[in-house]
């Protein structure tokens, strides 16, 4: 009887996981599994930090759920924000720390609120997505470049690591997060730029001081997912519009 009681909770957990990933593509499942295995291997091989591994894995789950336009992405994002901020602070990426703790953290709750208000019919965890016209795309981009230059100068004054790259990832992330909360497909262009620049940042830290290799894996996974996310959101947009 006791054995039966132990089996039932395990079956319920397995059933819940099976229902949650139902409808996932082979690419989504393979992407998550491959990068998770790479992460765990490098964590063991390089004796990486647990906090770095936590940030990497929760971040990967968060972005794959974002690419699927799932509200639950924000919950994994909360864990990622706290863990990643700690690792970034240890590496003197102060722009990244401020971005995560002063912006991403509160904006996560804003995102949950707005996404829940724009759910897709009777689907509790999916939303309706949309795009900007070309005029607004140009305005957003030019504004981001001006802010990037100003913030880069500020980070140079306080002697941050790679200040203008740090500034670019910060500014583009802010823009992308606003677009994320507004359910705009154009967010993925900014996330792709952020991911490329972040890979450069963490590669520099890894080469010069042997910092968390998990961060390199995480941002590489983010880049692959951002490209996929763009095409998947365009597909969802066409589906929403009945095309």
Image (cartoon, helix red, strand yellow):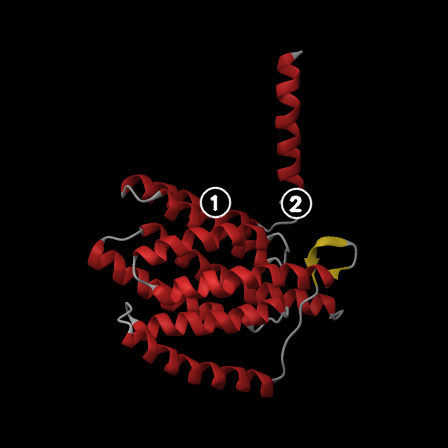
Q: Residue at x 31, y 51 (%)?
A: 212
Would you say 129 lies left or right of 40 here? right
Local crowd size for mark 1, using a 10 Å CA cut-off: few (<14), some (14–19), many (≥20): few
Residue that appears at 64% across and 26% down: 9
Residue 2 lies, with reference to residue 217, above or below; the image says above
Q: Residues within 10 Å of mark 2 (few under 14, many from 20)?
A: few
The reply to whether residue 82 is in sight is: yes
User: Element type at marker 1?
Assistant: helix
For image coordinates 53% across by 62% down, the residue present is 228
Tell me if 104 is positioned left or right of 96 in this view: right
Q: Give the numbered dot on residue 178.
A: none
Choose the circle earlier in sequence order: 1 or 2: 2
**Which residue is labeled 1 in the image?**
33
In-front residue for pair 170/73: 170
The part of the image, by quadrant, that contains residue 159 is bottom left
Residue situated furthest left in the rendering: 208
Relative image position of residue 151 (x, y in whole percent): 38, 78
Q: Give the side of residue 237 with respect to residue 199, left or right.
A: right
Residue 238 screen position, x and y as percent? 69, 69
Q: Of residues 198 and 86, which is closer to you in this image? A: 86
* Residue 31 at least partly seen: no
Image quarter in which the C terminus is found: bottom right
- Which residue is identified by label 2? 22
Q: Position of residue 155 (x, y in %)?
A: 32, 74
Disc 1/disc 2 C-alpha distance (Å) = 16 Å
The answer to the question of whether label 1 and label 2 lie on touching residues, with beta carbons closer than 8 A, is no
């Amino acid at each position: 009887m006791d054995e039966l009681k132990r089996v039932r909770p395990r079956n319920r957990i397995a059933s819940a996981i099976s229902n949650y990933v139902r409808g996932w593509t082979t690419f989504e499942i393979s992407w998550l599994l491959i990068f998770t295995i790479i992460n765990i291997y490098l964590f063991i091989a390089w004796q990486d930090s647990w906090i770095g591994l936590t940030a990497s894995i929760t971040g990967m789950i968060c972005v794959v759920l974002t690419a699927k336009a799932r509200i639950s992405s924000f919950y994994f994002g909360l864990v990622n924000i706290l863990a990643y901020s700690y690792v970034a602070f240890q590496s003197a990426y102060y722009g990244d720390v401020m971005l995560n703790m002063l912006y991403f953290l509160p904006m996560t709750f804003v995102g949950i609120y707005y996404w829940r208000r724009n759910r897709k019919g009777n689907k509790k965890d999916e939303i309706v997505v949309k795009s900007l016209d070309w005029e607004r795309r140009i305005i957003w981009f030019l504004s981001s470049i001006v802010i990037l230059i100003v913030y880069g100068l500020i980070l140079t004054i306080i002697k941050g690591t790679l200040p203008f790259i740090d500034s670019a990832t910060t500014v583009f992330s802010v823009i992308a997060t606003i677009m994320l909360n507004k359910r705009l497909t154009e967010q993925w262009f900014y996330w792709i730029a952020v991911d490329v620049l972040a890979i450069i940042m963490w590669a520099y830290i890894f080469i010069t001081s042997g910092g968390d290799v998990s961060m390199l894996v995480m941002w590489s996974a983010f880049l692959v997912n951002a490209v996929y996310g763009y095409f998947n959101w365009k597909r969802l947009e066409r589906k929403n519009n009945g095309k």
